[in-house]
Amino acid sequence: MGIKGERDGIPISIDEINKLRIVASKARNNVIKMQFYDHSIHVGSSLSSIEILTTLIFKYIRDSQSKYDRDWLILSKGHAAPGLYAVLAEKGLIPEEELWKIQDISGLLQGHPEVFIPGIDMSTGSLGQGLSFGIGVATGIRMQGGKGRVYVIMGDGEQDEGEIWEAMTHAVTRKLDNLISFIEVNNYQLDDSTDAVKPKHFLPDVWKAVGWRTLFCDGHDFASIVDAIEEAHKIRAPVVIFAKTLRGKGFPVIENTKVQRASPDDARKYLINA
Amino acid sequence: MMQGSILSMRDTLGKLLVELGEKDPDIIVMTADVGDSTRASKFKERFSDRYFNVGISEQDLVNFAAGLSAVGKKPVVVNFAMFLMRAWEQIRNSIARMNLNVKLVVTHSGYSDSGDGSSHQALEDIALMRTLPNFSVVIPADSADIRRGLPKILQHSGPVYYRVGREYSPQITENMDYEFEIGKSYVLREGSDITIIGAGVLLWDAMKAAEELEKKGISAAVINISSVKPIDEQTIEYYARKTGRIVTIEEHSIYGGVGSAVAEVVVKKYPVPMRFVGATTFGRSARSQRDLIDFYKVNYESVIKESLELMK
């Protein structure tokens, strides 16, 4: 047992938090650095997801030879792929030099996740599809009596997709308690703020009303994320965690705006000061 | 005017899935609230724990199957052809892109949902499905062809689109002795002047046309191209060379379907004149599938007419 966090009952030590913080910081810098090599990557959405991805990959995802006993990570908001790749590189699953070849014809890393990339469990990129896939995986695991859990990460804009509704009601019917979904609430989608395009403030009520256990966390605070996941593991029903995040978190020129990427010059200035 | 017995394709499908489920515990059958109409629910009666009705949600159905497949199960998605196309993008982006072992078994294809009208009649699905990398596309001719082919389809590793009709299913292959194989076509009748190539229930019309042409002194070969993808290039080339003329017939749009697939081979291997019999517009309601086949002239009379044109 390590030293407990500053807040009582948080099941993570300060040491552990510091380790996660170092990983996330490196991954954040690398996502911004990836911009030098390909200006078109989705930086804002990736930075929004860094802490959640770091927590899952470095603290929770269990590996196993068996497909039924390992945990699955599905990045349904596939445009945050650079963030996922940066964290997987810190884990040693992707060589760091591959990060600089993102989206290059000679590189491994595609603009959106593909299963031929190490550490990727579902090819995504078309929004709204990850949760249904996760239900299939979680159902298969349950049928086989496996220990695996399925984590699905979605965006708030993604919630516009009709398939989410289809999957949301389906998961409850299956009573899947090995399925944990994140919805990142950064209040932006491609064209504009979610309020301007299609408001999302009612979503927690909807998910709750159809039978999901609905939790909340600060998606950039490790203690808060861990707290929510620990709580989710105890619940015998599908769980959705609404994670408040900021698009472009930590990169001041685009933080909390709909802008996905800054200029290479802005990125250089950030990295020099990082 | 029908010859031979008529066995419902969907009834055969439902019974056969249960038989195959007995042999393989990994087979899981799922549908989007059309279990009774497709006869998929026969599986539920025997294996309630391996049968899922996800509700009226085809996109979820497809990715649910993809997920089950990713952990090693063998999902068989059974749905109406038309409404599964609603999830074509999910089929493309999840099943085909990850090359997952999911079988899409569709009923009510072509004009077979005659009464429900154009909204329920799938005349574009072959075109949509055969463009997808990794996918095989197979169309059984009749109930006997389903018995022959479905077990092989489920043994095949990789995604398959298996296109079944509904009730109307004149027996064409019942007394024929051949093994089904993905990628192979089957010569139903030998001929030397012209080749008629078709798939599905319209092979009855292909055979009928060949009989009528024979009375006029024209020798027509008939080929069951049940595997539209991968397609049997060798047999198509052989008959193009042998007969010099080809007419195709399909219960589907002539744009992008069986005829187009055959033509792609013909222009590459041995170009010969071709004619296409199939749909060119949406359907409408009718009391029977046969009424629609005749109303839209996707029938043996058109095959005869086109054949005679080619013989000139």
Image (tube, coloured by chain):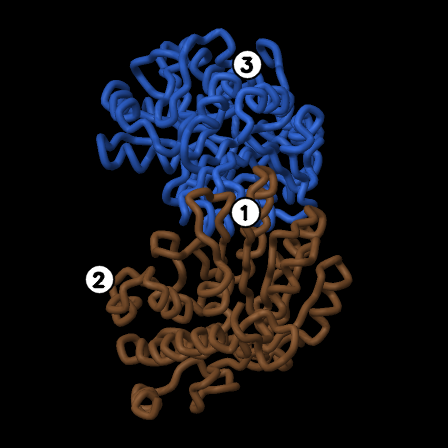
Chain colours: A brown, B blue
For the residue marked with disc 1, what is the amino acid?
A: Val
- Residue at the disc numbered 2: A106
Q: Chain of mark 2?
A: A
Count up the numbered dots: 3
Q: Are circles 1 and 3 on residues that touch, CB within 8 Å? A: no
For the residue marked with disc 2, what is the amino acid?
A: Ser
- The disc label shown at residue B171, or none: 3
SS of the residue at dot 1?
helix
Left or right for A198, reference A154: right
Q: Are marks 1 and 2 on the same chain?
A: yes
Can residue A122 be seen here? The reply is yes
B167 vs A248, nearest the viewer? A248
SS of the residue at dot 2?
loop
In primary-sequence order, the first of circles 1 and 2 is: 2
Give the distance between the C-alpha atoms of the residues marked 1 and 3, in whole angstroms: 40 Å
Within the image, what quadrant is residue A196 found in?
bottom right
Left or right for A95, reference B163: left
Residue sitting at x 54%, y 64%: A153
Residue B300 image point, x, y percent: 50, 22
- The disc label shown at residue A170, or none: none
SS of the residue at dot 3?
loop
Report the mark closest to the observer, 1 or 3. 1
Give the distance between the C-alpha atoms of the residues marked 1 and 2, in whole angstroms: 32 Å
- The disc label shown at residue A137, or none: 1
Residue sitting at x 55%, y 42%: A146
Residue A172 image point, x, y percent: 70, 52
Residue B94 image point, x, y percent: 47, 50
Residue sitting at x 45%, y 63%: A57
Q: Are marks 1 and 3 on the same chain?
A: no
For the residue marked with disc 3, what is the amino acid?
A: Gln
